[in-house]
Image (cartoon, coloured by chain):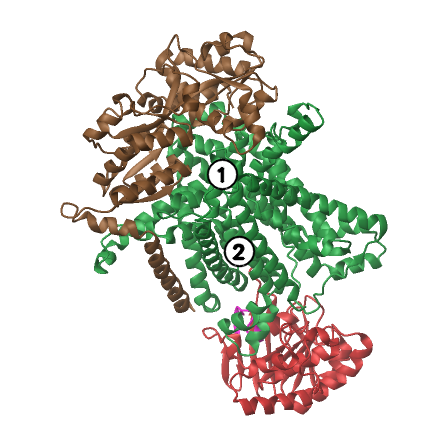
Amino acid sequence: MKRLMLNVNSWTISACFIIILLFLPNLTILKGVFVPSNENWDHLKNFVLQDYIQTSVLLVVFTAFFSIVIGLSLAWLIAQYQFPLRNFLKWALILPLAIPPFIGAYTYHGIVNYTGVIQKTLRNEFDIAVNPSFFDIMNIPGAIFIYTLFLYPYVYTITRIFLSNQSASLIESAKILGKGPWQIFFQIVIPISRVAIIGGSSLVVLEVLNDYGVVKYFGIQTFSTAIFQTWFGFGDIETSIKLSASLMGFVILILVFEKLLRGKKQFSFASTKVKPLPLIKLVGLKALFATSYVSVIFCFAFLIPVAQLVSWFILTFGKIPIDEFFLHIKNSVLVAGISATIIIFCALIVGNFSRIVKGKYVKLLPKVTVLGYSIPGAVIAVAVVTSFIALDRFLSPLYSAMGIDSKLVLSVSIVMLITAYIIRFFAIGYNAIESGYDKIGVDFSHASRMLGAGLIKTFVKVDLPMMKGAIISGFILVFIDIMKEIPLTLILRPFNFDTLATKAFQYASDERVMAASQASLFIITISAIAIFVFHYLLEKEPR
Amino acid sequence: MFIAIENVCFSYSNSKENAIDGFSMTIDKGEVISILGRSGSGKSSILRILAGLELPTKGTFKIADNILFNHNIFVHPEKRGIGLVFQDYALFPHMTVIENIKFGLFKLSKDEKKKRLKEVLELVELTGFENRYPYQLSGGQQQRVAIARALAPKPNLLLLDEPFSNLDAELQYKIRKDLRDILKKANITSIFVTHDENDAHALADRIVKIDKGRIVKIGRPCDMLGTPIKDGVLQ
Amino acid sequence: MKKIISLFVISLLLILAACGNESSDPAKKSSTTEKEETVTESKEVNLYTSRHYDVDDELYAKFEKETGIKVNVIKGEADELLERIKREGDATQADLLYTADVGRLYRAKEDGVLQAGSSELLDKQIPKKFQDNDQMWYGLTKRARVIIYNKDKVKPEELSTYEALTEDKWKGRVLIRSSENVYNQSLLASFIDINGEEKAKEWAAGIVNNLARNPEGGDRDQAKAIAAGIGDVAIMNTYYYGQMLNSEDPEEVKVAEGLGVYFPNQETTGTHVNISGAGIVKHSKNKENAIKLLEFLSAPEAQETFATANFEYPVNVDVEPSELLKSWGDFKEQDIPLSVLGDNNAKSIMIFNEVGWK
């Protein structure tokens, strides 16, 4: 009874409401596990599934590994050292996130293929005919290369913020104990940033699992291929949902595993003593090395592909209709902005719930919302359409009472698309918000309550201002992800609704990657502006 | 008898053993009580239970005949009128000294607020630091802001969690004395938790020694030098 | 708090629904007019299309200008759009489903989301061969899947049929994209119909055996691989070859110019063709307008636009292919009902999987 009194309050109710809402469409997929297997399932199992799973595992493991290596090393260099260009690269290293991986894949292939700039120059200027297979990136290592380049920022961003805010005392004490920089890195930095690393790399893993664009173009068969083969090829959506459900089951396993791995070691630094890590100035060779390493990664992950896109943009300028682009920009920014706002709002409520509530298992509850991020967007889309049509049918008496003549109102409006975004990208926003809550701990809000402020006042006056960084970073991550989102936008949009991403996809899917450069560059520019604003606001933050 | 705590029990959700077992005592108005125990003895849990941050499994807690919890009443922390000074102070980093202290004074009128602010700032001798941010203050100053913030709303009871653990030894000696002066000047009933016998002896009117969640001994500092009284005798 | 939140959610939903409706205004109006269909004519037609070409948009705009009927479009992937129509059921806003592959139209018909519709004009403009038997869908353009070869290394006389590419002489010289691609699925589906499942499987296995490399990339990439010397012949769509010849990138044009087009199976069963076409949605609210749009798209003017701007072959026999297409010569097409391509789709995927065609 008393437990109830402490736990049940408006937060709990709203949080559970949000969680259930986000989880419902996933449930329609998850129940697909119980669909009996048919001959399509058997066929897949007999001939291809093993190969596909093997490929998926390869992609996931190696992409995660390289993303961690690159993301963590960059985070550590930037957080601990001062070297030329550091202040620019600090935020520029997030920029690759603005490039949709499928555009990255098309672009890189465009650079290295037979008519690409490298082979063309070698051939025409120097008369060197190279072995084309040397430049072939349309294979598993190539896909790992692409995924790593455009997804490592997840690891980098989360780990860097963690390291620069939280590690000062530990690293300083290690130094006092006479540890060298490499020892500190391996014995202190890696273990203490484990939570951040796992958080970032799990986003990378989920992105790789749900991606279809890159592997389809490269002709690599993964688990997503199986999902789409049964749906598009066999016209058997039940089996493809069953496959998706299995994938979800696998992701649940990963989540449980992650929780076990984290164990009880939660690092919360709830005191004013949290101080920034002082920078060590590198000089001479060391500075040169640091600058070159970081710059090389920045070049590969951002500068080179963008330069290629710009040159294509110039080649095709005037041949691609441009008059509607302002409308597309407006659409993109509007849906991404609205969805990201709602996601962060909900994540704040759910995150606070998970922080306040007591009980280990209840705390795990919000984790189920991550499921929407684990399976291909097209499958989520089917679940969302189904839910919305049911909702519209349920609301139809209301519609007729309001004098609306249509049977479908919500499901032909943009609400459906935005809801789908929220279901899919909640995990990204929640991740950021949760780590923000972790960082401030509970003492500040307890202090506020001891001073007579209720939950809501505490939230507004104490938690929110202290969470500013987490809120902005969560918002930006979600915003960028939605800017470049494809399958949901394609299927769930209302009539005559185009975004920059759908435009880029339209040309790319028709193998007209040069024509796609225009929309892609707009996506990248807008996302880059968002990242810059994010960086600027965070820098100004006191403390 | 101003405060009555009766038979309070508490256990963590993941363990069956009682972290606090049958904690009972009464406190007079204006008394300074020290709860003394080793780390893990349950001393901090008592503080958090009294503050309303943890749920006791059993027991009653009354201040001036107002029930704060018993078997079917549970008053939320913000309604208890109890002040708490956190071990690491938990000063809001985004607020200045004055904003921190003002935080609990939202019920007062503007003039009253101003008056009260002046009072507590003088009490903790921090006049002139109003517009500093917490990170611009020394450890001792931070502690005094935390105390001022907790005292400002005139709580019935002030709780202090390890008030000296974050200060260096030299400062500790001075602040012990300052703290006692502040508490006595404010005439506030207070309970502080410590693991350091010297702290307890220097500050407290009475000391409650606990071990493994049970009271081992209660008495004035001068009485505490003898052998511990056996369990149960005091109850 | 709860109140605030629910208030927030509800108001947000309403606002969004309001602006959503504004943008999907046509959809709303169209259903408003549904009731009065007999009385007043609606001024809208709603299209779900998997074709992503700018030239399509130009044609819709022209249609709008000529008839005053507004064309509302959702562009997506064919199967996903079909699934959306299915789930929307009788409430759907869609009037036409327009896809770049006949297999999808067949599936839509099988799934019962299409209805019959006809007009004299349509019959006149679109040969029976490119219409559904029950007139539920109509072909609008066609593409041929041909053999592209390296002019320096392969003489056209060496080429004959798709089947001949499985001979030993082509070992390590054949290029074709992944079996995930619907054009390949339709190609194999046509062989299943013409030669039987056994022979089709032999063919697929033979191609896999002769591949110059694991299938990767799109159709254009196969052409580039010929130029790069990885292989000598590729199976690809004329449409992509035409695009390469007219590419913005001079290097691609150079590659394309070194290649030749060969229409296989001229002496035997004919070259494989597939169509882009549109089906009339069963619960269409603007069927009249849908048929008008079909008539417009199959009329000579639009057909010429398809042929010149998009390198597709017209279905309307009164319209000549573009100069470029004509320069490749006339060819004999496979003589099979196009619906078999859809019918055999699943079978062909299974064969691909079984023979290990990636």
Please identify, in this view, whether the residue under mark 1 or under mark 2 is nearer the observer: 2
Residue B137, horizontal then vertical, whole percent: 73, 77
Q: Taking the image as drawn, is residue A494 in sight? A: yes
Q: What colour is chain C?
A: brown
A96 lies above or below C149: below
The tag on residue A247 is 1
The residue positioned 32% from the left and 22% from the top of the image is C338
Q: Is mark 1 on a helix, strand or loop?
A: helix
Magenta region, residue range: B49-60
Mark 1 burial class by Cα count in 10 Å: few <14, some 14-19, many 20+: many
Quick one: SS at disc 2?
A: helix
Q: What's the residue at 46%, 59% (across, down)?
A: A342
Chain at tag 2: A
Looking at the image, residue A441 sits to the left or right of residue C130; the answer is right
| Colour chain A is painted in | green
Q: Nearer the viewer, residue C96 or A196?
A: C96
Q: Name the residue under label 2.
A: A430
Say if C282 sits above or below B174 in the image. Answer: above
Q: Which residue is more in the foreground, A147 or C307?
A: C307
Question: Considering only vertical position in the picture, is B6 above or below A370?
Answer: below
Q: Which of marks 1 and 2 is nearer the N terminus?
A: 1
Estimate the x, y position of residue A339 in percent, counting from the top left: 46, 56
Q: Which residue of the protein is positioned furthest toward the front in this rendering?
A: C323
Q: The red chain is which one?
A: B
Residue C192 versus residue A53: which sits nearer the camera? C192
The chain letter for the residue carrying disc 1 is A
Mark 2 is on which residue type? Tyr
